[in-house]
Structures are given as C-alpha cells and as structure tokens.
Image (spheres, rainbow, N blue to C red):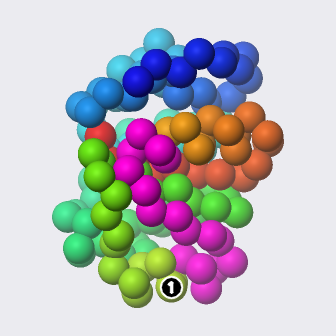
Amino acid sequence: MQFDLEINRGIFIRSFEPGELLVGDRSITGPVILTPDEIIDDWCPPPITELSIADFAAALAARPELILFGAGRTQAFPPLALMTDVMRNGVGFEAMDTAAACRTFNVLAGENRRVVAALLI
C-alpha cells in the first residue's frame, strides 16, 4: 500500500507491505515503535498473547496520548491486562492491523497529535 501525501517534518510512513515498512527512505522489516520524531527499531516484543506493559516502556516514555498497536496482517488484541495498564497511565490504546495503524499514525502525526505506533511488520 503506497501513501501519497507527503509531510516534510517528523516521521512519516511512506508505504507498508507485509514484511516491509518504508519510513522516509528507510526500510524497516522487523517490529518497530514510531513516534512523530523517533524510530525505535530495537523493539523485540514477545508473541501478542504474552505482551505486557513492560514491552511498551519505550512507547510510554514518549508520553503519548494514544498508542496504536499494529498486530500484523490481521487485527489481533493483546491481553486485556496490557490495555488496562496502558489506559491507567492516561494513554489510549487501539489495536488494529498494521496497515490501518500506519494510515492512522500518519493522520494523527500530521495533526501534531502525540501518537505512538507499535508495529509488527
């Protein structure tokens, strides 16, 4: 999926295909956390069913108002305890497929919202 609108400041997802995310001119092929200003590509999450708030420490450190979780090709939900813990920190949490999370990230980051995307590629 190619995204056409180009924003010249901050992190912008140019395209996503299963197995590859293009951020600017950089190709990313593994799990990644994106903020409007930073690419955190050393994120090594466990399987979705084992995710905990500790796995989102880097995302929470960015002090977002919302975390978008891209679960891969299809929407999948992490444990309810994780979503509850994130929301207890005053941060929204949305789970969706990775393509939808990429589109949503671009829209919200383009609106200068404090959004973080945690993406499984």
Assess whether residue 90 is covered by the magenta stretch.
yes
As rendered, which of 61 and 16 lies closer to the eye? Answer: 16
Residue 64 lies left or right of residue 71; in this view the side is: right
Asked which secondary structure carries label 1, the reply is helix
Decide if residue 118 is in sight here: yes
The residue shown at (20%, 64%) is 47
Assess whether residue 114 is covered by the magenta stretch.
no
The residue shown at (31%, 64%) is 76
The residue shown at (43%, 56%) is 96
Q: Amino acid at mark 1?
A: Thr
Range of magenta residues: 86-101
Q: Quadrant of the N terminus?
A: top left
Residue 59: horizontal and vertical position, in percent? Answer: 53, 58
Residue 65: horizontal and vertical position, in percent? Answer: 70, 63
Residue 58 vertical position relative to residue 83 in the rendered view, above or below? above
Residue position for label 1: 84
The residue shown at (28%, 59%) is 45
Residue 6 vertical position relative to residue 87 in the rendered view, above or below? above
